Image (spheres, grey):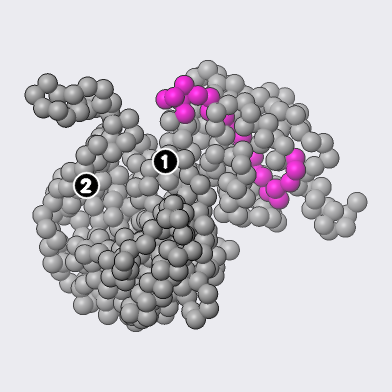
Amino acid sequence: MTPPPEGILVLGDSLLDRDVEGHAGRLSPDAPVPVLDEQACWARPGGAALTAALAALEGDPVTLVTSIGDDEAGEELRALLDGFGIELISVTGGPTPEKIRFLADGRPLLRVDRGSPPTPVGALPPDAVSAVHGAGVVVVSDYGRGLTGNATVRSALQHRLRPTVWDPHPRGCEPVPGATLVTPNLAELRTAFLSPAPSPPGAGSGRPHVALRAVAEATAAARQAWRVQAVATTLGPGGALLVAGDGPPLAVPAEAVTGGDPCGAGDRFVAAVASFLLRGGLLSEAVTSAVASASRFVAAGGAGALGAHNRSREASGPDRVGAEDLARRVRHRGGTVVVAGGCFDLLHAGHVSLLESARRLGDCLIVAINSDDSVRRLKGEGRPVVTQSDRSALLAALACVDAVVVFDDDSPIELLKRIRPDVFVKGGDYSSGPLPEAAVLAAWGGQAVTVPYLSGRSTSGLLRLASGVP
């Protein structure tokens, strides 16, 4: 389903996040502290700006209403947002806050916060009020810096007739009554509604059903106290618990993730919910999809992956950031990166066989799929049968697939230049001469190959069968 032109509006407190990465293999001679040998420094949007960037990567039109200072950090943040194609509506406020993480071999070593205490924001500009009323979905990203307490903001939000998703903060304001969904994490819920604090489901409490009951009761209490339509408490590796009415809560377990970086997982969850609701999806489906998206996001490196590469809009997709970061990490370990490309419309046994064979050729498998527009150009009207969002979700659910990325060109060549895989795989039914991608891969020592393919399996054949054509 095509999203409405109004798109997603993110309203809240923005920051500039920096990651300083390096290796810590020795202690300082003048104090027993590790010495970080800096190897790279990346900047990325933070706070509400991160939520907006992640929503833009879904391919949705995004507007951000926020306060960004007229300072060096603000200039850098504006440039980053422009790279994501985000429309910015500025609200008068103080300096741009910065959050700097120092990482030793991928693990957090220290965090430094810069910026003054929260500064009262000025009046909401008229175009911001109009944008709030007209947006298909509004996401409130509250980081406790004052914007969500603005009387004009709250009045505009309360008079909305379309979905509003509120991501709260312990130092922030209460959600406006009537909001569609509020998404506290367990720590945020615990502050006001949990006593004594239980362990989250799956955390080894010994009695997870007791902890789950306590979380369910607190989530229901939050919904009643805030007077909102639904509350989804995010539980980290435990998934999420949705309370939306008088019936039993919906428990959505998360896929097991080994390693990864949870930074930004809550923002990824909220952005995925908003994108799903924009397309008219049910709230329960939105939360279920968002849990899966957040798990993949964490496994692929979290928010830190956003800063590792320059973003472009020519190949947007929910996991493009994760795919590039995954390739970088695998190469850093000396592993082999494999990419398999295709439309993968109407996923069938031939596709699965190809992907399982491709995965056995290396240490990770990234699947590059043609966007809906690209498939239409290649296959004609009526294709694809399955949208790029659903094709991505189906492929990502396969055990042999480590990441999925969508490209909008007719060929994945530009994407391959960014990912630089060691191996590029096509199915064994390809018989049109040399692979056009082969010359590109040769530039960095990569190899294009085919793998055995199950004969008689094709999307075209399935469509003919379904229509009764022999």
Dividing the picture into quadrants, the one containing residue 92 is bottom left
Q: Which residue is mark 1?
A: 260
Q: Position of residue 21 (x, y in %)?
A: 28, 32
> 10 Å neighbourhood of mark 1: few (<14), some, or many (≥20)?
some
Contact (CB < 8 A) between labels 1 and 2?
A: no
Q: Position of residue 220 (x, y in %)?
A: 41, 75
The residue that appears at 43% across and 52% down in the rendered structure is: 203
Amino acid carrying mark 2 in the image: Lys
Which residues are drawn in magenta? 330-350
Amino acid carrying mark 1 in the image: Gly
Q: In the image shown, does 244 or 16 lie closer to the viewer?
A: 244
Residue 99 disc label: 2
Q: Position of residue 243 (x, y in %)?
A: 46, 73
Picture layout, residue 377 above or below residue 172: above
Picture layout, residue 316 above or below residue 274: above
Instruction: Provide the secondary structure element on which disc 2 rests.
Output: strand
